[in-house]
């Protein structure tokens, strides 16, 4: 039977959620595997597991219950090991690393910040600030819309300017928020987002962090910022005993 892994904690953790239900239909009972000073929060892995809303929430609920009483290293949704022995074997092999991560992430949460351009606002900004684009647009207008080549030229100029503005705005968002964070992890580029960054934040600094994001919103009115959190610090845990390659953090996975 394959083993589904929710997270890793210290064996001395005061309140691990043994006996509660996890992923699967019916929910598989959550249990604890101990290895030395560490413990893995696991259940049997259901066959054909997919990121449906019910199972995403079950994964989050187990981590929420465990994390309420102490630090837990969260595994991403869909982390499955061949069996219990494989899990305890990795705990033993990487014990020093996991102990260091538990200490480093204690009392901290993750906030993910994504940003996209408000199309009309950024185009207006580019037209006002880029004389070459403005001149080409005016030439096209005077030519009744411009020739095919003129239209292509204008489109290329606008696209290049937007790309440059995206890089500039992404850097500005990170600069505005980074001083309040303990660590930063830039996520993969994805269509539609000019910035996709996770910040590790001390729980006691959450209000300061959100205030910094709000200041960035005011400073960059042409950028729409979306904040997701507080979350377990998925982006600040290296792959665990069953970490699937290319999986998205539980909060960002697509529910069916």
Image (tube, rainbow, N blue to C red):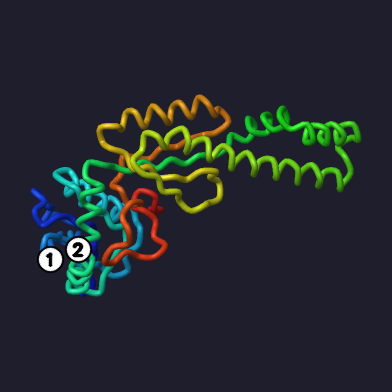
Instruction: Tell whether 90 sits left or right of 151.
Output: left
| Residue 113 x/y as whole percent | 43, 40
Instruction: Tell whether 136 sits left or right of 247.
Output: right
Q: Nearer the viewer, residue 254 or 88?
A: 88
| Residue 101 x/y as whole percent | 25, 53
Instruction: Specify the quadrant of the image occupied by residue 199.
Output: top left
On-image quarter of the C terminus: bottom left
Q: Earlier in the sequence, mark 1 or mark 2?
A: 1
What residue is rendered at 53% in x and 45% in y? 193
Where disc 2 sits, the SS reads helix
Q: Which residue is mark 1?
A: 35
Instruction: Specify the quadrant of the image occupied by residue 121.
Output: top right
On-image quarter of the N terminus: bottom left
What residue is rendered at 35% in x and 48% in y? 251
Q: Is residue 1 above or below residue 151?
A: below
Q: Nearer the viewer, residue 116 or 176?
A: 176
Where disc 1 sits, the SS reads strand
**What's the distance in space between the residues labelled 1 and 2, CA to CA?**
9 Å
Q: Is residue 124 above or below residue 78?
A: above
Tag 1 near tag 2, CB within 8 Å? yes
What residue is rendered at 17% in x and 61% in y? 40
Which labelled disc corresponds to residue 12?
none
Q: Residues within 10 Å of mark 1 (few under 14, many from 20)?
A: some
Q: Residues within 10 Å of mark 2 (few under 14, many from 20)?
A: some
Residue at the right extreme, as displayed: 143
Q: Which residue is mark 2?
A: 95
| Residue 187 x/y as whole percent | 45, 51
What residue is rendered at 59% in x and 39% in y? 168
């Amino acid at each position: 039977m394959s083993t589904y892994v929710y997270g890793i904690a210290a064996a001395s953790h005061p309140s691990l959620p043994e006996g509660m239900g996890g992923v699967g239909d019916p929910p598989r009972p959550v249990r604890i595997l101990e290895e030395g000073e560490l413990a893995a929060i696991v259940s049997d892995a259901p066959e054909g597991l997919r990121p449906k809303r019910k199972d995403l929430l079950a994964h989050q609920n187990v981590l929420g219950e465990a994390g309420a009483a102490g630090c837990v290293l969260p595994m991403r949704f869909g982390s499955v090991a061949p069996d219990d022995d494989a899990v305890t074997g990795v705990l033993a092999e990487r014990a020093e690393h996991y102990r260091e991560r538990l200490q480093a992430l204690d009392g901290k949460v993750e906030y993910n910040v994504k940003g996209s351009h408000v199309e009309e606002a950024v185009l207006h900004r580019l037209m006002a600030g880029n004389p070459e684009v403005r001149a080409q647009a005016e030439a096209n207008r005077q030519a009744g819309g411009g020739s095919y080549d003129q239209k292509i030229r204008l489109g290329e100029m606008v696209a290049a300017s937007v790309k440059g503005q995206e890089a500039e705005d992404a850097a500005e968002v990170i600069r505005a928020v980074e001083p309040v964070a303990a660590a930063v992890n830039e996520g993969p580029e994805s269509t539609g987002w000019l910035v996709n960054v996770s910040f590790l934040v001390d729980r006691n600094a959450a209000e300061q962090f959100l205030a910094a994001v709000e200041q960035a919103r005011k400073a960059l009115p042409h950028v729409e910022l979306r904040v997701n959190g507080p979350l377990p610090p998925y982006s600040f845990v290296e792959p665990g005993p069953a970490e699937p390659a290319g999986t998205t953090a539980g909060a960002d996975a697509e529910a069916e």
